[in-house]
Protein backbone atom coordinates (compact mmCIF):
# COMPACT_ATOMS: atom_id res chain seq x y z
CA UNK A 1 0.00 0.00 0.00
CA UNK A 2 2.87 2.37 0.86
CA UNK A 3 4.49 1.63 -2.52
CA UNK A 4 1.21 2.41 -4.30
CA UNK A 5 0.82 5.69 -2.43
CA UNK A 6 4.41 6.64 -3.24
CA UNK A 7 3.87 5.78 -6.92
CA UNK A 8 0.68 7.84 -7.03
CA UNK A 9 2.36 10.80 -5.30
CA UNK A 10 5.42 10.78 -7.56
CA UNK A 11 3.66 10.06 -10.86
CA UNK A 12 -0.12 10.51 -10.91
CA UNK A 13 -0.97 13.18 -8.33
CA UNK A 14 -1.04 15.99 -10.90
CA UNK A 15 -1.77 14.35 -14.29
CA UNK A 16 -3.35 17.30 -16.14
CA UNK A 17 -0.76 19.83 -14.95
CA UNK A 18 2.14 17.49 -15.74
CA UNK A 19 0.94 16.60 -19.27
CA UNK A 20 0.34 20.23 -20.21
CA UNK A 21 3.70 21.26 -18.75
CA UNK A 22 5.33 18.35 -20.62
CA UNK A 23 3.98 19.64 -23.95
CA UNK A 24 5.23 23.17 -23.26
CA UNK A 25 8.67 21.89 -22.24
CA UNK A 26 8.91 19.59 -25.30
CA UNK A 27 8.12 22.50 -27.63
CA UNK A 28 10.73 24.65 -25.93
CA UNK A 29 13.27 21.78 -25.90
CA UNK A 30 13.23 21.17 -29.67
CA UNK A 31 14.96 24.41 -30.72
CA UNK A 32 17.33 24.23 -27.76
CA UNK A 33 18.33 20.61 -28.46
CA UNK A 34 19.01 21.48 -32.11
CA UNK A 35 20.95 24.62 -31.12
CA UNK A 36 23.04 22.73 -28.55
CA UNK A 37 23.84 20.04 -31.14
CA UNK A 38 25.09 22.76 -33.47
CA UNK A 39 27.22 24.27 -30.67
CA UNK A 40 28.81 20.83 -30.12
CA UNK A 41 29.38 20.42 -33.89
CA UNK A 42 27.16 17.35 -34.35
CA UNK A 43 23.95 16.57 -36.28
CA UNK A 44 20.71 17.88 -34.71
CA UNK A 45 19.52 14.31 -34.18
CA UNK A 46 22.32 13.74 -31.62
CA UNK A 47 20.93 16.43 -29.34
CA UNK A 48 17.30 15.50 -30.01
CA UNK A 49 17.81 11.79 -29.27
CA UNK A 50 19.78 12.77 -26.15
CA UNK A 51 17.04 15.08 -24.90
CA UNK A 52 14.38 12.39 -25.45
CA UNK A 53 16.40 9.67 -23.71
CA UNK A 54 17.66 11.74 -20.77
CA UNK A 55 14.23 13.26 -20.05
CA UNK A 56 12.52 9.85 -20.10
CA UNK A 57 15.18 7.95 -18.12
CA UNK A 58 15.60 10.65 -15.47
CA UNK A 59 11.82 10.54 -14.89
CA UNK A 60 12.35 7.04 -13.46
CA UNK A 61 15.83 7.30 -11.94
CA UNK A 62 16.21 10.94 -10.80
CA UNK A 63 15.99 12.21 -7.24
CA UNK A 64 14.12 15.45 -7.99
CA UNK A 65 10.55 15.09 -9.38
CA UNK A 66 9.56 17.99 -11.65
CA UNK A 67 13.10 18.74 -12.81
CA UNK A 68 13.86 18.59 -16.55
CA UNK A 69 17.11 17.08 -17.83
CA UNK A 70 18.21 17.04 -21.49
CA UNK A 71 21.06 18.09 -23.78
CA UNK A 72 22.43 21.41 -22.45
CA UNK A 73 24.64 24.26 -23.59
CA UNK A 74 27.04 23.80 -20.69
CA UNK A 75 27.75 20.20 -21.72
CA UNK A 76 27.77 21.01 -25.46
CA UNK A 77 30.52 23.59 -24.98
CA UNK A 78 32.79 20.93 -23.43
CA UNK A 79 32.36 18.59 -26.42
CA UNK A 80 33.46 20.94 -29.20
CA UNK A 81 37.17 20.01 -29.22
CA UNK A 82 36.55 16.27 -28.87
CA UNK A 83 34.09 16.23 -31.81
CA UNK A 84 36.39 18.40 -33.95
CA UNK A 85 39.51 16.27 -33.29
CA UNK A 86 38.08 12.75 -33.05
CA UNK A 87 34.47 12.67 -34.32
CA UNK A 88 31.05 11.57 -33.11
CA UNK A 89 31.93 7.98 -32.10
CA UNK A 90 34.42 9.23 -29.50
CA UNK A 91 31.75 11.61 -28.17
CA UNK A 92 29.35 8.68 -27.67
CA UNK A 93 32.08 6.75 -25.82
CA UNK A 94 32.85 9.80 -23.67
CA UNK A 95 29.13 10.15 -22.90
CA UNK A 96 28.91 6.54 -21.63
CA UNK A 97 32.06 6.97 -19.49
CA UNK A 98 30.64 10.25 -18.15
CA UNK A 99 27.54 8.30 -17.00
CA UNK A 100 29.69 5.67 -15.27
CA UNK A 101 31.61 8.40 -13.40
CA UNK A 102 28.36 10.06 -12.32
CA UNK A 103 26.95 6.78 -10.97
CA UNK A 104 30.19 6.32 -9.01
CA UNK A 105 29.80 9.86 -7.65
CA UNK A 106 26.29 8.96 -6.48
CA UNK A 107 27.51 5.89 -4.60
CA UNK A 108 30.34 7.95 -3.06
CA UNK A 109 27.61 10.39 -1.89
CA UNK A 110 29.30 13.36 -3.60
CA UNK A 111 25.87 14.97 -4.06
CA UNK A 112 26.10 15.94 -0.38
CA UNK A 113 29.08 18.18 -1.23
CA UNK A 114 26.65 20.76 -2.66
CA UNK A 115 26.36 22.24 0.83
CA UNK A 116 29.94 23.52 0.44
CA UNK A 117 29.05 25.55 -2.66
CA UNK A 118 28.13 29.07 -1.57
CA UNK A 119 25.32 31.13 -3.09
CA UNK A 120 27.83 33.53 -4.66
CA UNK A 121 29.45 30.60 -6.54
CA UNK A 122 26.02 29.43 -7.78
CA UNK A 123 25.25 32.98 -8.99
CA UNK A 124 28.62 33.22 -10.76
CA UNK A 125 28.03 29.78 -12.32
CA UNK A 126 24.62 30.80 -13.68
CA UNK A 127 25.90 34.14 -15.01
CA UNK A 128 28.88 32.50 -16.72
CA UNK A 129 26.58 29.90 -18.31
CA UNK A 130 24.40 32.72 -19.69
CA UNK A 131 27.43 34.53 -21.15
CA UNK A 132 28.77 31.34 -22.78
CA UNK A 133 25.38 30.55 -24.35
CA UNK A 134 25.26 34.09 -25.77
CA UNK A 135 28.85 33.87 -27.09
CA UNK A 136 28.02 30.58 -28.81
CA UNK A 137 25.44 32.44 -30.95
CA UNK A 138 27.94 34.97 -32.31
CA UNK A 139 29.20 32.77 -35.21
CA UNK A 140 25.63 32.73 -36.58
CA UNK A 141 25.59 36.55 -36.50
CA UNK A 142 28.92 37.23 -38.23
CA UNK A 143 29.42 37.61 -42.00
CA UNK A 144 25.68 37.31 -42.70
CA UNK A 145 23.16 39.41 -44.65
CA UNK A 146 20.92 42.02 -43.05
CA UNK A 147 18.00 39.57 -43.33
CA UNK A 148 19.49 37.48 -40.50
CA UNK A 149 19.76 40.49 -38.18
CA UNK A 150 16.21 41.55 -39.04
CA UNK A 151 14.87 38.03 -38.41
CA UNK A 152 16.75 37.75 -35.10
CA UNK A 153 15.47 41.15 -33.92
CA UNK A 154 11.94 40.23 -35.03
CA UNK A 155 12.21 36.89 -33.19
CA UNK A 156 13.24 38.61 -29.95
CA UNK A 157 10.36 41.08 -30.33
CA UNK A 158 7.89 38.18 -30.68
CA UNK A 159 9.38 36.29 -27.71
CA UNK A 160 9.12 39.24 -25.34
CA UNK A 161 5.92 40.94 -26.60
CA UNK A 162 3.68 37.94 -27.41
CA UNK A 163 3.04 37.04 -23.70
CA UNK A 164 1.31 40.43 -23.29
CA UNK A 165 -1.46 39.46 -25.72
CA UNK A 166 -4.58 38.69 -23.61
CA UNK A 167 -5.43 34.99 -23.14
CA UNK A 168 -3.50 33.72 -26.20
CA UNK A 169 -0.19 35.02 -24.85
CA UNK A 170 -0.44 32.73 -21.83
CA UNK A 171 -1.65 29.65 -23.73
CA UNK A 172 1.20 29.26 -26.25
CA UNK A 173 4.92 29.55 -25.40
CA UNK A 174 6.34 32.65 -27.12
CA UNK A 175 9.56 30.85 -28.30
CA UNK A 176 7.33 28.45 -30.26
CA UNK A 177 5.42 31.38 -31.80
CA UNK A 178 8.76 32.97 -32.74
CA UNK A 179 9.87 29.79 -34.54
CA UNK A 180 6.55 29.32 -36.36
CA UNK A 181 6.28 32.96 -37.50
CA UNK A 182 9.90 33.28 -38.66
CA UNK A 183 9.79 29.91 -40.43
CA UNK A 184 6.58 30.87 -42.24
CA UNK A 185 8.05 34.26 -43.17
CA UNK A 186 11.31 32.75 -44.47
CA UNK A 187 9.43 30.18 -46.60
CA UNK A 188 6.89 32.74 -47.92
CA UNK A 189 9.57 35.28 -48.89
CA UNK A 190 11.98 32.60 -50.14
CA UNK A 191 14.84 34.07 -48.08
CA UNK A 192 18.28 32.62 -48.77
CA UNK A 193 19.38 32.18 -45.17
CA UNK A 194 20.73 29.27 -43.15
CA UNK A 195 18.17 26.83 -41.82
CA UNK A 196 18.26 23.80 -39.53
CA UNK A 197 18.29 21.66 -42.70
CA UNK A 198 21.72 23.08 -43.58
CA UNK A 199 23.13 21.78 -40.30
CA UNK A 200 22.40 18.10 -40.96
CA UNK A 201 19.52 15.70 -41.46
CA UNK A 202 16.84 15.47 -38.80
CA UNK A 203 15.97 11.94 -37.64
CA UNK A 204 13.00 10.32 -39.34
CA UNK A 205 13.17 7.08 -37.36
CA UNK A 206 13.06 6.10 -33.72
CA UNK A 207 16.51 5.79 -32.09
CA UNK A 208 18.20 2.37 -32.08
CA UNK A 209 20.86 0.75 -29.90
CA UNK A 210 24.26 1.98 -31.06
CA UNK A 211 27.52 0.82 -29.46
CA UNK A 212 30.27 3.42 -30.14
CA UNK A 213 32.62 2.25 -32.90
CA UNK A 214 35.90 3.04 -31.14
CA UNK A 215 38.84 0.74 -30.36
CA UNK A 216 38.65 -0.53 -26.77
CA UNK A 217 42.23 0.46 -25.92
CA UNK A 218 44.07 2.46 -23.28
CA UNK A 219 44.74 5.12 -25.91
CA UNK A 220 40.98 5.62 -26.43
CA UNK A 221 40.51 5.89 -22.66
CA UNK A 222 43.28 8.52 -22.47
CA UNK A 223 41.53 10.54 -25.19
CA UNK A 224 38.00 10.45 -23.75
CA UNK A 225 38.67 10.41 -19.98
CA UNK A 226 39.50 14.15 -19.57
CA UNK A 227 36.33 15.06 -21.48
CA UNK A 228 34.22 12.50 -19.59
CA UNK A 229 35.50 13.74 -16.23
CA UNK A 230 34.77 17.37 -17.16
CA UNK A 231 31.30 16.43 -18.47
CA UNK A 232 30.55 14.42 -15.30
CA UNK A 233 31.60 17.26 -12.98
CA UNK A 234 29.80 20.02 -14.90
CA UNK A 235 26.71 17.84 -15.39
CA UNK A 236 26.47 17.07 -11.67
CA UNK A 237 27.19 20.66 -10.65
CA UNK A 238 24.46 22.04 -12.90
CA UNK A 239 22.06 19.26 -11.89
CA UNK A 240 22.69 19.75 -8.16
CA UNK A 241 22.30 23.52 -8.50
CA UNK A 242 19.11 23.15 -10.53
CA UNK A 243 17.75 20.69 -7.94
CA UNK A 244 18.45 23.26 -5.22
CA UNK A 245 16.59 25.95 -7.19
CA UNK A 246 13.58 23.63 -7.83
CA UNK A 247 13.60 22.64 -4.13
CA UNK A 248 13.18 26.33 -3.29
CA UNK A 249 10.49 26.88 -5.95
CA UNK A 250 8.36 23.91 -4.86
CA UNK A 251 9.20 24.05 -1.13
CA UNK A 252 10.16 20.35 -1.18
CA UNK A 253 13.38 18.44 -0.67
CA UNK A 254 15.22 16.09 -3.05
CA UNK A 255 17.70 13.23 -2.91
CA UNK A 256 20.91 14.69 -4.38
CA UNK A 257 22.85 11.41 -4.35
CA UNK A 258 20.03 9.57 -6.15
CA UNK A 259 20.05 12.42 -8.68
CA UNK A 260 23.77 11.79 -9.31
CA UNK A 261 23.10 8.11 -10.07
CA UNK A 262 20.03 8.96 -12.16
CA UNK A 263 21.99 11.44 -14.30
CA UNK A 264 24.65 8.75 -14.84
CA UNK A 265 22.12 6.11 -15.94
CA UNK A 266 20.45 8.65 -18.27
CA UNK A 267 23.77 9.58 -19.89
CA UNK A 268 24.73 5.93 -20.43
CA UNK A 269 21.34 5.42 -22.10
CA UNK A 270 21.88 8.52 -24.24
CA UNK A 271 25.32 7.36 -25.41
CA UNK A 272 23.92 3.93 -26.35
CA UNK A 273 21.27 5.39 -28.70
CA UNK A 274 23.52 7.92 -30.42
CA UNK A 275 22.91 10.88 -28.11
CA UNK A 276 25.26 13.35 -26.41
CA UNK A 277 25.73 13.85 -22.68
CA UNK A 278 23.27 16.11 -20.87
CA UNK A 279 22.19 17.26 -17.43
CA UNK A 280 19.45 19.17 -15.64
CA UNK A 281 18.35 22.44 -17.28
CA UNK A 282 17.75 25.47 -15.09
CA UNK A 283 15.60 27.29 -17.66
CA UNK A 284 13.45 24.31 -18.68
CA UNK A 285 12.97 23.18 -15.08
CA UNK A 286 11.67 26.63 -14.16
CA UNK A 287 9.38 26.60 -17.26
CA UNK A 288 8.09 23.18 -16.14
CA UNK A 289 7.37 24.28 -12.57
CA UNK A 290 5.76 27.56 -13.69
CA UNK A 291 3.60 25.62 -16.21
CA UNK A 292 2.26 23.37 -13.45
CA UNK A 293 4.65 20.39 -13.68
CA UNK A 294 5.34 18.80 -10.29
CA UNK A 295 5.87 15.04 -10.61
CA UNK A 296 8.00 12.62 -12.63
CA UNK A 297 5.25 12.43 -15.26
CA UNK A 298 6.09 15.93 -16.55
CA UNK A 299 9.69 14.97 -17.46
CA UNK A 300 8.52 11.68 -19.01
CA UNK A 301 5.85 13.47 -21.06
CA UNK A 302 8.34 16.11 -22.25
CA UNK A 303 10.69 13.41 -23.59
CA UNK A 304 7.97 11.40 -25.33
CA UNK A 305 6.30 14.45 -26.92
CA UNK A 306 9.72 15.66 -28.10
CA UNK A 307 10.47 12.40 -29.95
CA UNK A 308 7.01 12.18 -31.52
CA UNK A 309 7.25 15.73 -32.88
CA UNK A 310 10.77 15.29 -34.24
CA UNK A 311 10.19 11.93 -35.95
CA UNK A 312 6.82 12.77 -37.51
CA UNK A 313 7.28 16.52 -38.14
CA UNK A 314 10.95 16.43 -39.16
CA UNK A 315 10.37 17.88 -42.65
CA UNK A 316 8.84 20.99 -41.13
CA UNK A 317 11.53 21.33 -38.45
CA UNK A 318 14.27 21.40 -41.12
CA UNK A 319 12.77 24.62 -42.54
CA UNK A 320 13.35 26.54 -39.29
CA UNK A 321 15.75 29.44 -39.97
CA UNK A 322 18.86 29.60 -37.75
CA UNK A 323 17.94 33.21 -36.90
CA UNK A 324 14.88 31.89 -35.02
CA UNK A 325 17.04 29.56 -32.93
CA UNK A 326 19.54 32.35 -32.28
CA UNK A 327 16.67 34.50 -30.98
CA UNK A 328 15.51 31.66 -28.69
CA UNK A 329 19.04 31.08 -27.36
CA UNK A 330 19.55 34.80 -26.72
CA UNK A 331 16.27 34.69 -24.76
CA UNK A 332 17.56 31.68 -22.79
CA UNK A 333 20.80 33.56 -22.14
CA UNK A 334 19.01 36.70 -20.93
CA UNK A 335 16.63 34.63 -18.79
CA UNK A 336 19.44 32.58 -17.26
CA UNK A 337 21.58 35.58 -16.25
CA UNK A 338 20.97 36.73 -12.67
CA UNK A 339 20.41 40.47 -13.21
CA UNK A 340 19.84 40.97 -9.49
CA UNK A 341 23.49 40.07 -8.93
CA UNK A 342 24.52 43.32 -10.67
CA UNK A 343 22.27 45.39 -8.38
CA UNK A 344 23.54 43.45 -5.35
CA UNK A 345 27.17 44.33 -6.12
CA UNK A 346 26.60 47.51 -4.10
CA UNK A 347 24.85 45.74 -1.21
CA UNK A 348 26.88 42.56 -0.81
CA UNK A 349 30.28 42.33 0.96
CA UNK A 350 33.39 42.72 -1.21
CA UNK A 351 34.41 39.08 -0.61
CA UNK A 352 31.04 37.81 -1.93
CA UNK A 353 31.37 39.97 -5.05
CA UNK A 354 34.95 38.80 -5.68
CA UNK A 355 33.85 35.14 -5.48
CA UNK A 356 30.98 35.72 -7.93
CA UNK A 357 33.04 37.75 -10.42
CA UNK A 358 36.02 35.34 -10.23
CA UNK A 359 33.72 32.39 -11.00
CA UNK A 360 32.34 34.21 -14.05
CA UNK A 361 35.77 35.33 -15.33
CA UNK A 362 37.38 31.88 -15.00
CA UNK A 363 34.46 30.08 -16.67
CA UNK A 364 34.28 32.53 -19.58
CA UNK A 365 38.08 32.48 -20.02
CA UNK A 366 38.42 28.68 -19.93
CA UNK A 367 34.95 27.67 -21.28
CA UNK A 368 34.93 25.12 -18.45
CA UNK A 369 32.29 25.50 -15.74
CA UNK A 370 34.14 23.08 -13.45
CA UNK A 371 37.24 25.31 -13.28
CA UNK A 372 35.12 28.34 -12.41
CA UNK A 373 33.24 26.54 -9.66
CA UNK A 374 36.53 25.17 -8.25
CA UNK A 375 38.05 28.67 -8.12
CA UNK A 376 34.84 30.09 -6.62
CA UNK A 377 34.64 27.43 -3.89
CA UNK A 378 38.36 27.87 -3.10
CA UNK A 379 38.05 31.66 -2.80
CA UNK A 380 34.85 31.37 -0.73
CA UNK A 381 36.65 28.96 1.66
CA UNK A 382 39.64 31.31 1.97
CA UNK A 383 37.44 34.34 2.68
CA UNK A 384 35.45 32.33 5.23
CA UNK A 385 38.60 31.12 6.97
CA UNK A 386 39.95 34.67 7.06
CA UNK A 387 36.67 35.98 8.46
CA UNK A 388 36.45 33.27 11.12
CA UNK A 389 40.08 33.95 12.01
CA UNK A 390 39.08 37.42 13.17
CA UNK A 391 36.49 35.98 15.56
CA UNK A 392 39.09 35.26 18.21
CA UNK A 393 39.51 37.35 21.34
CA UNK A 394 42.07 36.75 24.06
CA UNK A 395 41.81 38.84 27.22
CA UNK A 396 43.88 38.56 30.40
CA UNK A 397 44.05 39.72 34.00
CA UNK A 398 46.71 39.41 36.67
CA UNK A 399 46.16 38.64 40.35
CA UNK A 400 46.74 41.19 43.11
CA UNK A 401 50.29 39.97 43.79
CA UNK A 402 51.23 40.19 40.15
CA UNK A 403 52.47 36.56 40.17
CA UNK A 404 49.63 34.78 38.30
CA UNK A 405 47.95 35.83 35.03
CA UNK A 406 44.75 34.29 33.62
CA UNK A 407 44.28 34.36 29.83
CA UNK A 408 40.67 33.91 28.63
CA UNK A 409 40.35 32.65 25.05
CA UNK A 410 37.04 33.26 23.22
CA UNK A 411 36.44 32.00 19.67
CA UNK A 412 37.74 29.55 17.07
CA UNK A 413 41.38 28.48 16.91
CA UNK A 414 42.42 26.92 13.59
CA UNK A 415 45.02 27.40 10.83
CA UNK A 416 43.86 30.94 10.04
CA UNK A 417 43.81 32.23 13.63
CA UNK A 418 46.70 30.23 15.15
CA UNK A 419 49.27 33.04 14.71
CA UNK A 420 46.90 35.50 16.39
CA UNK A 421 46.47 33.00 19.25
CA UNK A 422 50.24 32.67 19.84
CA UNK A 423 50.82 36.42 19.47
CA UNK A 424 48.37 37.26 22.27
CA UNK A 425 50.63 35.81 25.02
CA UNK A 426 53.50 37.70 26.71
CA UNK A 427 56.21 35.10 27.30
CA UNK A 428 58.74 37.56 28.80
CA UNK A 429 56.52 38.68 31.70
CA UNK A 430 57.93 37.51 35.08
CA UNK A 431 55.21 35.22 36.45
CA UNK A 432 55.00 32.16 38.65
CA UNK A 433 51.92 30.77 36.96
CA UNK A 434 49.77 31.22 33.82
CA UNK A 435 46.19 29.96 33.60
CA UNK A 436 44.73 29.54 30.09
CA UNK A 437 40.92 29.41 30.24
CA UNK A 438 39.58 27.63 27.11
CA UNK A 439 35.97 27.16 28.23
CA UNK A 440 34.73 29.50 25.47
CA UNK A 441 37.17 28.40 22.76
CA UNK A 442 37.31 25.55 20.26
CA UNK A 443 40.36 23.93 18.66
CA UNK A 444 39.69 22.66 15.15
CA UNK A 445 42.86 21.26 13.60
CA UNK A 446 46.47 20.20 14.16
CA UNK A 447 47.69 23.75 13.42
CA UNK A 448 45.65 24.95 16.42
CA UNK A 449 47.02 22.12 18.57
CA UNK A 450 50.58 23.00 17.50
CA UNK A 451 49.90 26.65 18.49
CA UNK A 452 48.76 25.55 21.97
CA UNK A 453 51.88 23.36 22.31
CA UNK A 454 54.06 26.31 21.33
CA UNK A 455 52.47 28.60 23.94
CA UNK A 456 52.72 26.06 26.79
CA UNK A 457 56.30 25.03 25.97
CA UNK A 458 57.47 28.65 25.65
CA UNK A 459 56.05 29.55 29.06
CA UNK A 460 57.63 26.45 30.65
CA UNK A 461 60.93 27.31 29.03
CA UNK A 462 60.76 30.67 30.86
CA UNK A 463 60.16 28.81 34.13
CA UNK A 464 56.43 29.61 34.33
CA UNK A 465 53.90 26.99 35.46
CA UNK A 466 50.98 26.56 33.00
CA UNK A 467 47.47 25.34 33.79
CA UNK A 468 44.83 24.76 31.08
CA UNK A 469 41.17 24.97 32.12
CA UNK A 470 37.75 24.31 30.59
CA UNK A 471 38.69 22.62 27.30
CA UNK A 472 35.57 21.11 25.68
CA UNK A 473 35.39 17.42 24.84
CA UNK A 474 35.90 17.78 21.06
CA UNK A 475 38.95 20.03 21.51
CA UNK A 476 40.35 17.73 24.22
CA UNK A 477 40.12 14.76 21.86
CA UNK A 478 42.23 16.38 19.13
CA UNK A 479 44.69 17.89 21.66
CA UNK A 480 45.17 14.52 23.42
CA UNK A 481 45.80 12.84 20.07
CA UNK A 482 48.17 15.35 18.45
CA UNK A 483 49.40 17.59 21.29
CA UNK A 484 52.87 17.16 22.85
CA UNK A 485 52.95 19.74 25.69
CA UNK A 486 51.75 17.16 28.26
CA UNK A 487 54.02 14.35 26.95
CA UNK A 488 57.53 14.86 28.45
CA UNK A 489 59.33 12.59 25.95
CA UNK A 490 57.78 14.33 22.99
CA UNK A 491 58.59 17.78 24.41
CA UNK A 492 62.24 16.84 24.97
CA UNK A 493 62.44 15.52 21.41
CA UNK A 494 60.78 18.67 20.07
CA UNK A 495 63.18 20.92 21.96
CA UNK A 496 66.16 18.90 20.83
CA UNK A 497 67.23 17.55 24.27
Image: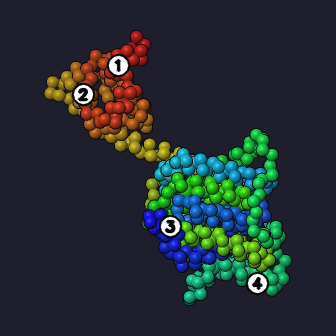
Could you classify mark 4 by the number of other residues whose Cα lies within 10 Å: few (under 14), some (14-19), or many (20 or more)?
Answer: some
Give the labeled residue for mark 1: 487
Of the residues tagged 1 and 2, which is closer to the observer?
1
Q: State yes or no: discs 4 and 3 in contact (Cβ < 8 Å).
A: no
* Mark closer to the chain start, 3 or 1: 3
Among the 4 quarters of the image, the one containing residue 191: bottom right
- Mark 4–mark 1 Cα distance, whole angstroms, equals 86 Å
Q: Is residue 264 above or below residue 157?
A: above
Asked which quadrant contains residue 302, the reply is bottom right
What is the distance, in whole Å, between disc 2 and disc 4 at their CAs? 86 Å
In this image, 454 relative to 52: left or right?
left
Q: Position of residue 38 (x, y in %)?
A: 75, 64
Nearer-N-terminus badge (2/4): 4
Residue on which disc 3 sits: 7
Q: Is residue 211 left or right of residue 260?
A: right
Q: Position of residue 53 (x, y in %)?
A: 67, 64
Q: Nearer the viewer, residue 156 or 288?
A: 288
Where does label 2 land, which residue? 435
Residue at point 35% right, 27% down? 480
Q: In the image, which is nearer the foreground, mark 3 or mark 1?
A: 3
Q: Earlier in the sequence, mark 3 or mark 2?
A: 3
x and y percent of residue 436 in the render?
27, 30
Mark 2 or mark 4, which is nearer to you?
A: 4
Say few, some or many: other residues with alpha carbon within 10 Å of mark 2 (under 14 / 14 to 19 / 20 or more): some
SS for dot 2: strand
The residue labelled by disc 4 is 184
Amino acid sequence: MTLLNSLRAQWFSNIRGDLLAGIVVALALIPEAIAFSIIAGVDPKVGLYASFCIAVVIAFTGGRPGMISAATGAMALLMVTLVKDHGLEYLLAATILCGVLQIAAGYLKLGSLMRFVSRSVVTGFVNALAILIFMAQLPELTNVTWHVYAMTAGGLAIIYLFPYIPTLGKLIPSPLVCILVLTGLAVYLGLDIRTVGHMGELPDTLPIFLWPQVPLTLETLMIIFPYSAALAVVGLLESMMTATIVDDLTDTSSDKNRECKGQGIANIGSGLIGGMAGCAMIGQSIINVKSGGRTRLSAFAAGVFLLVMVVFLGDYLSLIPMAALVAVMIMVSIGTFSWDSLINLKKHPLSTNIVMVATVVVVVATHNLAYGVFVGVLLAAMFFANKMGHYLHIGSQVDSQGRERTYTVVGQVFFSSSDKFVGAFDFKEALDKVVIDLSRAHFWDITAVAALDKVVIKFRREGTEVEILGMNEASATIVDRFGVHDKPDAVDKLMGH
